[in-house]
Image (cartoon, rainbow, N blue to C red):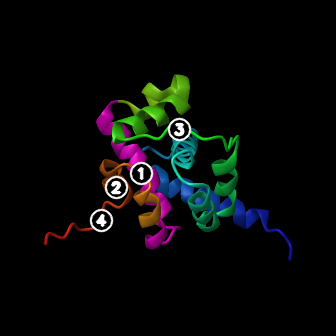
Amino acid sequence: MALNFDQYSAKGKEFLKKASEAMQVEYDDKVAGRIIRAVFHALRDQLSPEENLQLLAQLPTLLKGVYVEGWNFSPKHRIHHAADFFNEVRSRLGATAAHDLGNDEMARRRIAGVFEAMSAYVSAGEMEDVSSQLPKDLKTLILPKQETHLF
């Protein structure tokens, strides 16, 4: 079976476009790319190795490379609130964090945009599994369309 790098590139660009639109970033592949990478890297450090592999299996090939780039498997500190996740993403953006994420409202919208784009490629069940390993107040960013049922 031959590798189809054009197809991998097209899927990666398609994801980038979906994420840019969901983040409400003018199609700027540099900004969107930095945010996607930072969210992926913050996310992978919060998931179990098994969950990371299950998520990776569903991502487009090009994005798998972004996800695993520089991955260190040593145990990481667990976050307990959405604000901690935002700060983790900001720290991974470094000097561009203020520009790329802005205030907390913009950060929430942009981080949610990455998860929204992911949901176009990753099954609903896998997105639920991912959200189950994160703080509860992040669940609305990962599964925004899910209704809450009261008993």
| 50 relative to 98, above or below | below
Q: Nearer the viewer, mark 4 or mark 3?
A: 4
User: Disc 1 or 3, which lies upstream in sequence?
Assistant: 3
Q: Nearer the viewer, mark 1 or mark 4?
A: 1
Q: Nearer the viewer, residue 81 or 2?
A: 81
Measured as percent of width and height from the top left, residue 99 is found at 45, 28
Measured as percent of width and height from the top left, residue 13 is found at 61, 56
Marks 4 and 3, how far apart in space? 26 Å
Region rendered in magenta: 103-126
Residue underneath mark 1: 134
Marks 1 and 3, how far apart in space? 25 Å
- Please say if the residues under marks 1 and 2 sit with CB atoms less than 8 Å apart: yes
Marks 2 and 4, how far apart in space? 10 Å
Give the number of the disc on residue 145.
4
User: Disc 1 or 2, which lies upstream in sequence?
Assistant: 1
User: Disc 4 or 3, which lies upstream in sequence?
Assistant: 3
Give the structural element (helix, strand or loop) at label 1: loop
Give the structural element (helix, strand or loop) at label 4: loop
Q: Nearer the viewer, residue 26 or 108?
A: 108
Residue underneath mark 3: 31
Image quadrant assignment for residue 59: bottom right
How many residues crowd around disc 4 within 10 Å: few (fewer than 14), some, or many (20 or more)? few
Residue 27 is a magenta residue: no
Give the number of the disc on residue 139.
2
